[in-house]
Every structure is written in C-alpha cells, then in structure tokens.
C-alpha cells in the first residue's frame, strides 16, 4: 500500500540533500519487486513540504549508468507517495549556445540505450504508455521558473539523448547526434522518465551542462574532472532551485500525468493473477478493483 510520506522526490547526487533548511530527516530502505534502490531514500521537511531525496548512483557514486536500479528507484518513490520527480542530471551539450555552467530544462527525449529494462510491465500485465512528450510540461514550467529565479543562465527546450555509457562518445558519435538534432547528451534520463510516466508521476529534468561532449573543435573533450568541477560549482544553484520549486509548488497537478495508465492497460483484468495484482498494486491498483 502506498504510504503518503513525501509528495515530491529529487533524484540526483547525495550532495543535494545536504542543504540548509532541510529538517527532520529520516532514511527509508524500501524493498521492491525490482530489488533494492540505489541508496536509502532520505525524507526531510523543506519549506514545509516533505521531500524525498535519492542518490541515483548510490552513496559514493558506485553504480554505473547501466547498473542503476531504475525500476526499484521509481517504484520505491511511488510507494512513499511521491507524485512529482525532479531529476538533477549532469549532461553534455550538443549546441554552441548551451554552454558549460548553464542549466537546461529539456522538452523531449531520445533513448539510445540498449541494456536496460525500460518498463515495469511484464509477466502477465501489459501496458502501452504514451510518451510523445516524456517530460511533464507543468512541472517543467515550474522548474524553469525556479532555476531562473536563482540567476543561473537557463534554457528551455531541446531533445536529450541518453546513451548507454559508461564511456563518453567518440567524435563520430557526437557529430552524428548533433546531425540528428539532439541538444543534450547524458546517460541516465532513459528509462527513468518513462518509468515515472508508467507510475503516473510528473517528471522534469534540471540538466546541468558540464561540457561540450567531444564535437567542439575549440574545446577540450569531456573528462570526469570537467564534470565534477561543474557539478560542484552548480550544487548550490540546484539546492536553491529545489527550495524555490518546493516553496511555490501548487498542490494540484495541472497535467495528465496522474491519468497516464487510464487507457494504457491492454491485458484483460480477468487474466491478471492475484500475484501480479499485488506486485503492481502501487502502480495500477486503482484500475484493477
């Protein structure tokens, strides 16, 4: 049964929840049908709202992008009552005007991964979710406003391509992604965004540009040091943006995310076993009464 513990979740680095103003923190270790989460989920009160924080790559950044248990993470956050998810992600830029240090709120997603489970639904329950617009427009609008209010250089829009990793791109790959019209490149937004939609959660990304990938002829190719330096500089911006977002977040969701499964389940309810009903109750319980 879903516990109404936190209404909004933040997925990113562990440094995000080491912020002034976060009070009464408590750790939750949530077991899911999809295994353990990347890390314990830290829930605290921020601006009068209970917020859940999850370190995507684990404490100490020990999980590769492929090893991140995306299904367990989203399922656990849903089980704690989260309705909205903000992803704070490092990314490379595939555009000249999206420079290192800037923050982008993308509006579409291209999944170029190959080794990840992309859906919750399996083993006797089939659902075909609609993801023409994979990011919640309403939450993205509010995230954009919160980031702009920090004074950071902010952009809205652009397609975000997710590659498998953990290696960075070759020049041929990077130039190909640019030719395809991609704006940003990262390693974790897919399948996270799709799973959030299957869980009927609003999902938006604060993408922190750390580099120009490897396509830019006058800039150095991306390195781990580059990524870390920019993320450290931007941590306070992300924290302040999250504070502002939580402070101004409207209680009612002005979007269709909470009804995403209403027309997606194709399996005849009579054919869904009691075991599968129990497994998927946090996700589809309201549709299988």
Image (cartoon, helix red, strand yellow):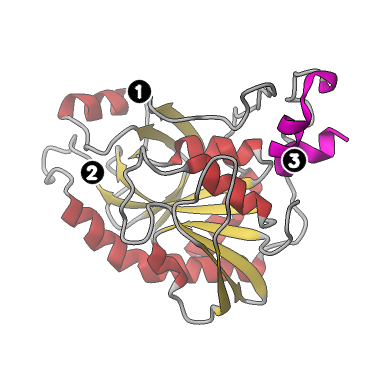
First along the sequence among labels 1 and 2: 1
Point out the frontmost of discs 1 and 3: 3
Residue 285 appears in view: yes
First along the sequence among labels 1 and 3: 1
Quick check: 268 above or below 99? Answer: above
The residue beneath circle 2 is: 212
The residue beneath circle 1 is: 180
Magenta extent = 269-289
The residue beneath circle 3 is: 281
Give whichever of 234, 125 is nearer the camera: 125
First along the sequence among labels 2 and 3: 2
Q: Which residue is drawn at the image coordinates 40% and 64% (left, top)?
A: 14
Residue 150 appears in view: no
Secondary structure of residue under mark 3? helix
On the image, the x and y values in percent for residue 233 come to: 29, 67
Point out the frontmost of discs 2 and 3: 3
Report whether 109 appears left or right of 132: left
Q: Label 1 to label 3, Cα distance in Å?
A: 39 Å
Quick check: 180 above or below 183? Answer: above
């Amino acid at each position: 049964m879903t516990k109404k513990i936190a209404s909004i979740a933040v997925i990113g680095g562990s440094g995000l929840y080491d912020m002034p103003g976060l009070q009464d923190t408590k750790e939750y270790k949530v077991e899911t049908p999809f295994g353990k989460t990347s890390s314990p989920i830290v829930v605290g009160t921020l601006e009068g709202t209970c917020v859940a924080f999850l370190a995507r790559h684990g404490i100490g950044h020990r999980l590769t992008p492929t090893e991140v248990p995306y299904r367990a993470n989203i399922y656990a956050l849903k089980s704690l009552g989260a309705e909205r998810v903000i992803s704070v992600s490092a990314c490379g830029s595939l555009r000249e005007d999206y420079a290192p240090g800037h923050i982008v709120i993308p509006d579409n997603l291209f999944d170029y991964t190959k080794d990840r489970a992309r859906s919750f639904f399996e083993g006797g329950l089939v659902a075909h979710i609609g993801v023409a617009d994979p990011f919640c427009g309403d939450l993205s609008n509010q995230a954009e406003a919160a980031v702009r209010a920090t004074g950071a250089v902010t952009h809205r829009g652009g397609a975000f391509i997710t590659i498998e990793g953990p290696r960075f791109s070759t020049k041929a790959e990077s130039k190909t992604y640019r030719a395809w019209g991609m704006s940003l490149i990262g390693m974790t937004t897919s399948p996270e965004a799709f799973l959030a939609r299957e869980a009927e959660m609003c999902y938006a990304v604060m993408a922190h540009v750390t580099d120009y990938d490897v396509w830019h002829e006058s800039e150095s190719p991306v390195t781990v040091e580059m990524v870390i330096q920019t993320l450290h500089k931007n941590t306070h911006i992300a924290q302040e943006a999250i504070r502002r977002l939580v402070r101004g977040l409207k209680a009612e969701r002005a979007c269709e995310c909470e009804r995403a499964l209403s027309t997606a389940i194709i399996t005849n309810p009579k054919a869904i076993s009691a075991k599968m009903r129990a497994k998927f109750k946090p996700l589809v319980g309201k549709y299988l009464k």
